[in-house]
Amino acid sequence: MNRAAATPAPQEFDRVLSSMCTEPHPAAREAAVAFLADNPGDPATYPAVSDLEAEAVETLGDVVGLDDPHGYVGSGGTEANIQAVRAARNLADGDVNVVAPESAHFSFQKAAGVLDVELRLAPTGDDHRADVAAVADLADDDTALVVGVAGTTEYGRVDPIPELGEVAAGVDARLHVDAAWGGFVLPFTDRDWSFADAPVDTMTVDPHKMGQAPIPAGGFLARDAETLDALAVDTPYLESDAQPTLGGTRSGAGVAGTHAALDALWPDGYRDQYERSQANADYLAAELDARGYDVVDPVLPLVAADVPDDEFESLRNDGWRISRTASGELRVVCMPHVTRGMLEDFLADLSAAGRT
């Protein structure tokens, strides 16, 4: 058997509508390949990629409204969310809890299990955003962290971040914002979500999603250096003295790719892409509504709609990569690779499925 012939090909993106990852920018791809063997987890040994990471973090600070950012490029949103919980726990005394909306990413459940922290989930309102009163009811003197989401994975909603900041302040807790997906589109909206809009302590923002960097590339950002100090451990056999990251060896490809994507796209390229993606989401929502489906209004470039099971399965059989929300709606994420032509083909197949 010819082993080369049997090797699976990489995923084509021409029918991918469910993923929050996308094809990397060409410059990011090229930079990633160049730094495949560099380890930013050992900055003294690999100073070139370390310098790229420092510059990338500075630019990520511009993206999220933070003048003097502290942080690093890690593996993704799960790592960053775990780090936010870990920092809050380490900076607090005794047993603590974390309060988050039920729309929070499942990585917070992982964080709670790994770190032995109680996770309290508050219901969301009819608008699929965090219910501030419900969050306040769950927060108490043992709450170390209040979580808000800026671009939820199921409905693309932005929680009332400033109000959640007030809840956090009322119980002397930290405020974390998970903007893993939304962070690269929200700067071009009028929504309050960033370090500049609220007393945010830490934030997750993923370059390998809307930022068009290669996988893995997730950003963890903090307002102050004390947060990273609370995460640091000694590294006696490395040239550097301490390491605040969760991973030891990290991806030089992700760091270099992030730097290249930011250099190529921030801010005008990201603005143009947001406008195209949002226009595609608005188009799809309007077309689904016109066909009689119940549609959740797309606040960001993500569309959810009630589509019958038989039509959903027919679309999957036609090769469309689609997913459902927890409530069962069809979920389409209008990522940079999603074109108007793709959506027109998708709607044609949906119409055919409805006739079978």
Image (cartoon, rainbow, N blue to C red):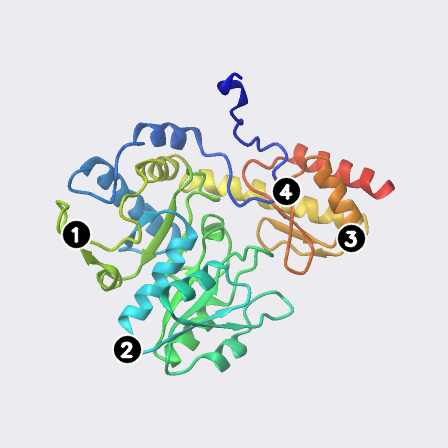
Distance Cα–Cα, label 4 vs label 3 = 17 Å
First in sequence: mark 3 or mark 1? 1
Using the image, determine if residue 223 lies above or below residue 89: above
Numbered label tally:
4
Query: Which of the 4 image quarters holds residue 253?
Result: top left
Q: Which label sits in the foreground, 4 or 2?
A: 2
Q: Is residue 32 visible?
A: yes
First in sequence: mark 4 or mark 2? 2
Residue 186 picture location, percent across and down: 48, 53
Q: Quadrant of the C terminus?
A: top right
Q: Give neighbour class at mark 3: few <14, some 14-19, many 20+ (Cα, 10 Å).
A: some
From the viewer's perspective, is 251 left or right of 345?
left
Which residue is disc 1 drawn over?
235
First in sequence: mark 2 or mark 3? 2
Distance Cα–Cα, label 2 vs label 1 = 25 Å
Q: Are marks 2 and 3 in contact (CB under 8 Å)?
A: no
Q: Which label sits in the foreground, 3 or 1?
A: 1
Which residue is disc 4 drawn over?
280
Q: Give neighbour class at mark 2: few <14, some 14-19, many 20+ (Cα, 10 Å).
A: few
Which residue is disc 2 drawn over?
93
Distance Cα–Cα, label 3 vs label 1 = 56 Å
Judging from the image, what secondary structure is the residue with disc 3 in? Answer: loop
Q: Which label sits in the foreground, 2 or 3?
A: 2
Judging from the image, what secondary structure is the residue with disc 2 in? Answer: loop
Residue 292 picture location, percent across and down: 81, 52
First in sequence: mark 4 or mark 3? 4
Label 2 amino acid? Asp
First in sequence: mark 4 or mark 1? 1
Q: Residue at x 49, y 52 (%)?
A: 182
